Amino acid sequence: MIVSDHRRALILIALYGAILAGWFSFARRVASPIIASANQGRSSAVLNRLVQDTRSAAPLATTVLEHWRHFSGAVLLAGLLHLAIVLWIRLHDPARTGQGSSPRRRLERWANPVLILLSFAFLALTVQRGGIQDYYFYLQMWREVWLGHDPWFFAYGVFGKYPMNAYGPLFNVFAIPAFVNPLLPKLLFAGAYLVFAVWLIKDRGKDWPQAGLVWPLLLVWFWMPYCWVELADFGHFDVLVGLLCAATVEARVRQRDVISGVCLGLGVLLKFMPIVLLPFLILDRKRPRYRLLSAAAVTIALGLGASVLLWGPSTFRPLIFAAERSSHHLSIYRFLKGRYSPLRWLDFHEDPDQAAPAFMLIALLWAWLLVRRRMIEPTPAAVLTVLVTLMFYQVGFAQYHMVLFVLASYWMMSARGAIRETIPLWVALGCYFGWLSIFDVILSTTNIDSMGMQEWIGLPTFLLGCFLLVSIVRSPSISRQDPAAPDESLAA
């Protein structure tokens, strides 16, 4: 069995190697000369027009031929990533090790090919869509890093004069893979999500009852339109923030406080939002966990200190910008100052955005007191914290909710049976991210401003958030059953 598995893996690697080598040879020796000739008008009229009308979506490409090299290189990298994911799927195949019941093995026969095909389509769309939406601006930021300029340079746009880079210093590290290939960071974001989804389905989902009914629903959940748009289409990196938050919680429930603190610190250095988790995760039966706190503080201090040495005090511009920027998209504050706001009936003329920081702090304080009083487990406490933050933060971009999606997926797949059987919670999650999927599809296909959607979309988002919040709080097993047993956790 072992020899056979090794042989199959080697055959698989050889097959991928042959295909990718053929693609590399075609891209360099066949396609490149044809594109170069067509770009100079020396090919057929149709091909000349096709090549000459092609515009590069990546700021790092200045010619059509260079754009083709970036695209063909991204295809090669996507193939290598898909090979790694296929091997990852095989690694978690119970039929390979002789584990699992016969019905489960039969289920694997169709589940594995579906996972492989979905992963292939996901990576293919990631490459095909290229550098659009926010990812286009990511490339500009990483280009400034390579040129030795200030990564948090000012730009002029919808927010007035603002730092285009609203992220932490760790975000600038992706300038390295972007230099290798402009689409490599986007592929890494998508690949990290696919590995996470496969791990939850194959590892945490193996003990679920009625797997034949549950697994199709899990495939729908992890490949819902929200994920396709945010990752494969737009290339947002918020999934990495969510994965670091999930790793923080995983280490916390396993009593590995130093690792938990380091993961949380890295999440803060990538995008400052995860700092809200710190007061919740250091609670342990009303006593602080100082090792977690110290590890997080040291990691954040070292990262910010290194950034200040490299780029100066502009490191902190995103923090100021986050507090001052106006409400947009899915924010309840955007609805409250819009055309359909009930505040207009009360003749209220103050800007609701001004009260957003105070409301968010009050909501987080309420959540912290609730977690402390009910001794809520770290995982649902993290989900609750992120949800409250998203509900009351004044900027409601859809990509921010990817952190909640990752944490909620991790919680529901790792939880005990009582959580899995909480139908209202599943319904609330389905409604919340189903709405985000609808919004993202509309956002990716049309101009929501021309449709006037920003005037009202904050209201259903907030109401669905309230429904999800109530469903979490009323879940029967979010609190520790035995306060005297510190090792017990939902993911243990």
Image (cartoon, rainbow, N blue to C red):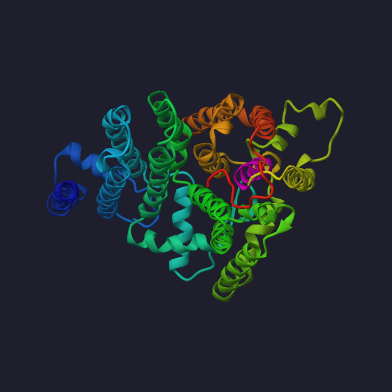
Seen in the picture, residue 85 relative to 329 is either above or below; the reply is below
Q: Nearer the viewer, residue 63 or 351?
A: 351
Asked whether 313 or 475 is in front, the reply is: 475
Position of residue 276 measured from the top left corner of the image (x, y, whole percent): 67, 52
Residue 448 seen from this side: no
Residue 300 is at least partly visible in this image: yes
Q: Residue placed farthest to the bottom in the image?
A: 309
Residue 12 is situated, as x and y percent measured from the top left of the image, at: 18, 46
- Residue at x-position 29% and y-position 48%: 78
Q: How many marks?
A: 0
Question: What is the x, y in percent for residue 344?
Answer: 81, 28
Residue drawn at x 84%, y 36% is: 349
Q: In the visual, does 58 lie left or right of 82?
A: right
Task: Let me know if residue 254 is in the magenta part.
Answer: no
- In this rendering, the answer to whether 115 lies above or below 61 is above
Closest to the observer, 367 or 441: 367
Q: Is residue 400 above or below residue 302?
A: above
| Range shown magenta | 378-390
Above or below: residue 90 compared with residue 277: above
Q: Position of residue 358 (x, y in %)?
A: 79, 47
